[in-house]
Image (spheres, rainbow, N blue to C red):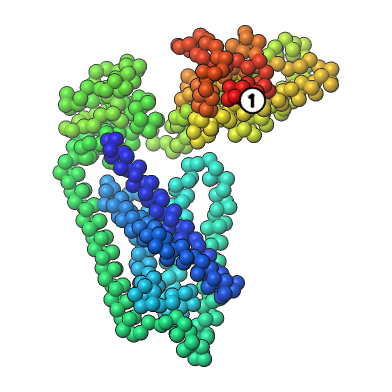
Amino acid sequence: MASALWQGNWITRTRITTGLVLLIFAFFHFLNIGLGLISPEWMDEFQDARQVITRSLIGSLILGTSLILHAGLALWNLARRRTLRMRWGEALQTVLGLLIPLQLIAHIVFTRYSHEVYGTNDEMPYQIILMWASPEIWQQSLLLLAVWIHGCMGLHYWLRLTRWWRPLIPWMAGVAVFIPAFAFAGLLTEGRRIYDLFVEGTERAALMADFNWPSQQAFAQMFETETLWLSIFFALLGVTAAAYLLRKLLRRRRAVTIRYAFGPEIRAERGMTLLEMSRAGGVQHTSLCGGKGRCTTCRVVVDEGGEHLPPPEPPEARSLERVKAPANMRLACQIRPQTPLTVTRLFRPDGRKGRAHASQGSEQQLAVLFLDMRGFTARTAGQLPYDVVFLLNRFFDAIVPAITNAGGTVDKYLGDGLLALFEERSPARSARAALEAAAAIGTALQDFNAQLAADGEPEVRIGIGIHLGELVLGEIGSAAHAPRTIIGGSVNTASRLEAKTKELGVELLISARVLEAAGYDSDHLPLETFQLRGVSRPLDALPVEHAAALPRTLAGEQR
């Protein structure tokens, strides 16, 4: 399995890398065409500059290898699919990818191939004249759109899960629309100019000499080359289809029957988990953790055939033990049936559509920050409710920007305190953001207390606890009223650290796990060990008397 996973990752990385190379080439190629809208000289000069790279030995190898690998891996991926059912976006991208070679082959043959074999000067005006008064102009225009849409969809699918991509989507959508529009405008402008000169007659001979226009025999040979390459492409498509059908036939011969109580009967390939079989067969099967074995919502009662299943591995056994499962209960994401089974799904979806996918939850390793105002009850005793609310809002107005500016979000307000979460792409970035927020809170508190002192009011004291660990983010509540919340032992640990600051008389207590994730050597910091209530193991943490002094404390460690 590890080998297959590595291979899958290698294939994915290669497709992304080669796709980026081809998209960059297309981007500059389309810009080149668009320059015809501004100046024919700029168009020629830009093409000459591009070809210094693209027609060098290294550039040609990179571009050619990327084209072959990207197309080859796409066909390989199609041949290895279990089903051709796919999302509409994926289906559109696949169809566009299969249509691209039908026109790209002709484009390559009459430009680069013609240049290398017959010495044609295949600059942009030559290419435009060659296709201007024929259906080829429309076909190549559709090729431009197909290439661009296919590439932009691939780029979006690759980056859509990153946080920094989301704010850029409106801008990138504008770029995605501008580039083909600019290319079409340049094509029309330069096409009208150069073709008028060509058909007029006075410039025809000079242009043909400048282009080293291929002879009729050369054109005939290029048409034969185009037909040959198209035949090879269709043959590869046929091999892909044959491989897909053969694999499907073999899977059917190796299939195992799964019967669901209160549900359908399906046949699925051996080697898949029962959860994968359910999904491949269109059977709704609850699995909140996504089949990672970190929950028990996919468990089934094995009514028949359980004697042929191997005993649970330790992780599955521990999960089943937690829910006091009987001997015939298993996790669907962990068993791989080799013989027919009859099973009963413990949790069957009710078919309602009111919940978003986020309601299932997602597991992440993030830093959490608990903050509480010290002595709030005694401070506000006897005050009017409006005065209490006024003080709290002033306090939160002062410190919350320190959290949001560091990339954090306030998950919930807890009266005179709050719980903040730092959703970053990696635990290291999340930990650094939490430390940055804590130092900024300390500075903001000093400024806020200075304002209170000027108003003749006592200063505010706080306690902050920061910890990093596994959290589950999901919507908790009824389908129509389910706010997002976070669940996990790390939340309790951060809360206990915050409570410990009151006993220690410090503003900040940071767990060693946060410091290590942020890249600090905890061996050189004055850590203390605490046995926190509700936390099973002793925890090392760094007390900081004043949160604003955190950068100096950590800088001392670095020195």
Please state, as top left, top right, bottom left or bottom right, where the N terminus lies in the image: top left
Q: Is residue 213 above or below residue 288?
A: below
**Dot 1: element:** helix
Q: Which residue shows up at 22% across the image and 40% down it?
A: 268
Residue pointed to by mark 1: 551
Q: Position of residue 368 (x, y in %)?
A: 55, 24
Q: Which residue shows up at 16% across the image and 26% down it?
A: 308
Residue furthest front in the image: 559
Residue situated in front as seen by the camera: 556 or 381: 556
Q: Is residue 431 above or below residue 254?
A: above
In terms of image quadrants, where is residue 380?
A: top right
Q: Is residue 233 above or below residue 120?
A: above
Residue situated in front as seen by the camera: 442 or 289: 442
**Crowding at mark 1 (Cα within 10 Å: few <14, some 14-19, many 20+):** some
Residue 456 can be seen in this image: yes
Please state, as top left, top right, bottom left or bottom right, where the C terminus lies in the image: top right
Q: Position of residue 434 (x, y in %)?
A: 58, 27
The answer to whether 362 appears left or right of 14 in the picture is right
Q: Which residue shows up at 20% across the image and 37% down it?
A: 270
In terms of image quadrants, where is residue 182?
A: bottom right
Residue furthest bottom in the image: 202
Q: Position of residue 86 (x, y in %)?
A: 35, 49
Kindly identify the amino acid type of the residue bearing the numbered disc 1: Pro
Residue 414 can be seen in this image: no
Residue furthest left in the image: 253
The answer to whether 503 appears left or right of 518 in the picture is right
Residue situated in front as seen by the camera: 423 or 302: 423
The answer to whether 193 appears left or right of 104 in the picture is right
Q: Position of residue 200 (x, y in %)?
A: 51, 90
